[in-house]
Amino acid sequence: MAKKLENMTQDERIAYWAAQREKERIQRRDRIAKLSLDQRVAVIKVYQLVDEILDTAMYPDLGGIKAVTAYDLQELADAKDRLRHEFNFDVREHG
């Protein structure tokens, strides 16, 4: 029988949560591996664009929100449309 979390030592809790994080990381890796190549590319592209645009927008030393260009936003809109297509997203249907 597994030891209850509240009865574990600090080192045991640290090891337990490290194992939980690793298990979840493997599950996420397996789920993304099940996506089609086009779906993975769509997800990665949206993530990259959001990351780049937020880096620019949020930090004044990178230019701040005024440095986000219309081109950046168009690229993001295109990536969003591709993501919607790959996963059949329609916000009207999903609330």
Image (cartoon, grey):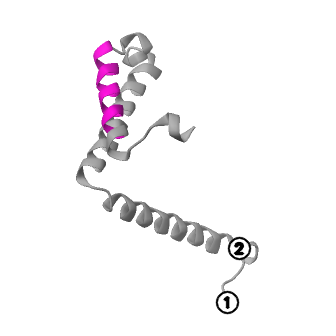
Given residues 4 and 45, the one toward you in this image is 45
Residue 60 screen position, x and y as percent = 44, 16
Say which element carries label 2. Answer: helix
Label 2 belongs to which residue? 5
Label 1 belongs to which residue? 1
Residue 40 screen position, x and y as percent = 29, 49
**Which of the 4 quarters of the picture holds residue 5?**
bottom right
Q: Residue furthest left?
A: 37
How busy is the neighbourhood of tag 2: few (under 14 within 10 Å), some, or many (20 plus)? few
Q: Residue furthest right?
A: 6
User: What residue do we see at 36% from left, 33% from top?
Assistant: 80
User: What residue do we see at 34% from left, 44% from top?
Assistant: 43
Q: How many marks?
A: 2
Left/right of residue 68 with respect to residue 22 in the rendered view: left
User: What residue do we see at 36% from left, 16% from top?
Assistant: 68
Given residues 33 and 52, the one toward you in this image is 33
**Tag 1: amino acid:** Met
**Which of the 4 quarters of the picture holds residue 17?**
bottom right
Q: Residue furthest top?
A: 66
Q: In the rendering, which numbered label is found on residue 62? A: none
Residue stretch rendered in magenta on the structure? 70-83
How busy is the neighbourhood of tag 1: few (under 14 within 10 Å), some, or many (20 plus)? few
Rounded to the nearest angstrom, the CA distance separating label 2 from label 1 is 12 Å
**Tag 2: amino acid:** Leu
Left/right of residue 50 with respect to residue 74 in the rendered view: right
